Amino acid sequence: MKKRLILVAGNIGAGKTSITEKLGERLGWKTGFESVADNPYLPDFYASMADWSFHLQVFFLGHRAEQHIVASESDGSAILDRSIFEDFYIFARALRQLGNMNERDYNAYRAVFNLVIKSLPKPDLLIYLSAPVEVLKNRINQRGREIETGISEDYLKLLESFYQEWLRNFDICPVLTIKSNDLNFVDNSEDLDIVVERINKTLAGRDELILGD
């Protein structure tokens, strides 16, 4: 199979890490995950979002750009559990919307983001995982991560609105939308088979597909 770079996008709790792990295992793809445990800005950010949001976003941007480049230059196919594009189009926008990033920092971050993505190789496919907000909230509660205790349904709805707007205008590569509440690709190998089949068809040149209807 031709070498591919696959990005996974989706709201908090959509299942990005799970599908990245499963597809990596099934297809022998290299995997890349979001940097959380080794992020030096997270404690400060959660203590004072308005003071540290710019620093946090710059750290994530650098981490994801490096991850994207390493994955694209690897010997085989690779899949990453969040796209670099979400940093700006989803999370920086949310920080500004909620008053946690001022206009000066937002514009400075946007300028750096635009310069960075211009130099990055294009991905071959974006997998977008979607699920109703109430499902996302239940999953977040069930996994019990301390840093996610303050995530509200209103915040998830805001992110969801940004995802819909971003994807309407996304044309960098094909998009495969997967409704993760309809497919149990973690525990059901047949559901994972369906996902793999649709990925292969999309990579072969089919139009955008929605999986889970």
Image: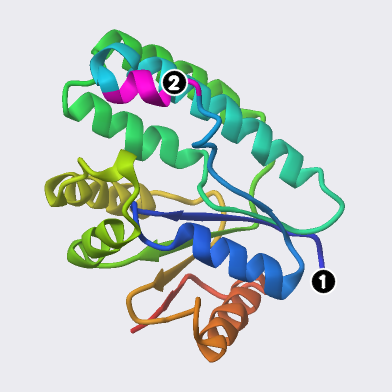
Callout 2: 10 Å neighbours few (<14), some, many (20+)?
A: some
Instruction: Please indicate whether residue 43 sits to the left or right of residue 34 in the image.
Output: left
* Percent coordinates x, y for residue 197 in the rendering: 61, 83
Instruction: Please indicate whether residue 4 sits to the left or right of residue 188 in the image.
Output: right
* Percent coordinates x, y for residue 49 in the rendering: 26, 20
Instruction: Please indicate whether residue 189 sits to the left or right of residue 88 in the image.
Output: right
Query: Quadrant of the rendered structure where residue 139 is?
Result: bottom left
Which of pointers 1 and 2 lies earlier in the amino acid sequence? Answer: 1
Which dot marks residue 1? 1
Q: Mark 1 belongs to which amino acid?
A: Met
Instruction: Please indicate whether residue 180 sits to the left or right of residue 37 in the image.
Output: left
The vertical placement of 108 against 164, above or below, is: above
The vertical placement of 59 against 157, above or below, is: above
* Percent coordinates x, y for residue 155 in the rendering: 18, 44
Q: Main secondary structure of the magenta part?
A: helix
Residue at label 2? 41
The region drawn magenta spans 40-46
Which residue is at 63% across, 69% downward?
23
Which residue is at 43% across, 81% downward?
184
The vertical placement of 33 against 131, above or below, is: above
Q: Is residue 43 magenta?
A: yes
Looking at this view, name the residue that lies furthest to the top. Answer: 104
* Near-viewer residue (120 or 53): 53
Q: Mark 2 belongs to which amino acid?
A: Tyr
Judging from the image, what secondary structure is the residue with disc 1 in? loop
Q: Is residue 107 magenta?
A: no
* Near-viewer residue (209 or 195): 195
Which residue is at 51% across, 28% downward?
39
Which residue is at 82% across, 47% downward?
74
